[in-house]
Image (tube, grey):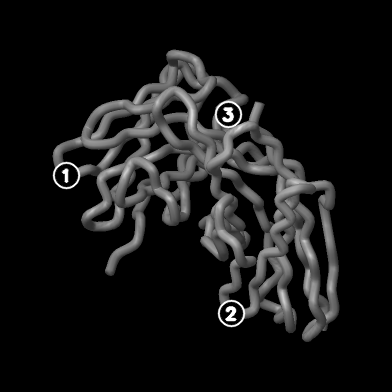
Amino acid sequence: DAGVTQSPTHLIKTRGQQVTLRCSPISGHKSVSWYQQVLGQGPQFIFQYYEKEERGRGNFPDRFSARQFPNYSSELNVNALLLGDSALYLCASSLHREANYGYTFGSGTRLTVV
Amino acid sequence: AQKITQTQPGMFVQEKEAVTLDCTYDTSDPSYGLFWYKQPSSGEMIFLIYQGSYDQQNATEGRYSLNFQKARKSANLVISASQLGDSAMYFCAMRGFSGGYNKLIFGAGTRLAVHP
């Protein structure tokens, strides 16, 4: 079975540009969450989507947006990139919204803003 | 506020020995879950072990065990018989529920180095 897949694996963008990151959850998983991990820190929650609706949002500016498609895959969009947006962006999927046991993470997209 | 604290930025252990990674948490919710993840240099967060707040026994998964002390609000990870492949970042996380949704709250992590 395929795990959580994220694309691209690495990305370099210039300040002010926009970026779209993609995530495909494990087959059958309906919930996708996005996390930002700045170098040297633990991941920080950005969004949770369940059944194509936003269910939760972390403390991130409106430049960050996301959506979930009918096949439960998800995109994270970041507009007007800042140097501080450089981070590893992780996607996690779970079978249910509550995820009592399992959040399965992808390998992440490493974004560098120059 | 819900918070995870990992006070050990780095730890090292000799191969085949046991090591304990510390984690304390803070929450006012009676129901919560605690997770440990391993993050190698590739970046993927690999699930290791889970402990529910109402679980009576400490969780174990192979060489991993979780020393859950509810009164002290601690959830330390014990790795027995360390292997070279255990060298990685280790994150303690808590499942928090607020505003109608779940999220994971992570600590800052502990970098473990296993020496031959």
Kind of residue at disc 1: Asn
Q: Nearer the viewer, mark 1 or mark 2?
A: 2
Task: Identify the residue position indicated by label 3 in the image.
Answer: A114
Task: Identify the residue position indicated by label 1 in the image.
Answer: A71
> Residue B81, image x and y in percent?
74, 83
Task: Identify the residue position indicated by label 2 in the image.
Answer: B62
> Residue B86, image x and y in percent?
68, 72
Say if B79 sits above or below B16 in the image.
Answer: above
- Badge 3: chain ID: A
The answer for how far apart the CA atoms under marks 2 and 3 are is: 43 Å
Q: Nearer the viewer, mark 1 or mark 3?
A: 1
For label 1, the SS is loop
- What is the residue that sits farthest to the left in this orientation? A70
Q: Is residue A40 visible?
A: no
- Residue, x 63% and y 37% (percent of image)? A38
The answer for how far apart the CA atoms under marks 1 and 2 are is: 35 Å
* Residue B16 found in image quarter: bottom right
- Badge 1: chain ID: A
- Say few, some or many: other residues with alpha carbon within 10 Å of mark 1 (under 14 / 14 to 19 / 20 or more): some
Relative to B41, B113 lies left or right: right
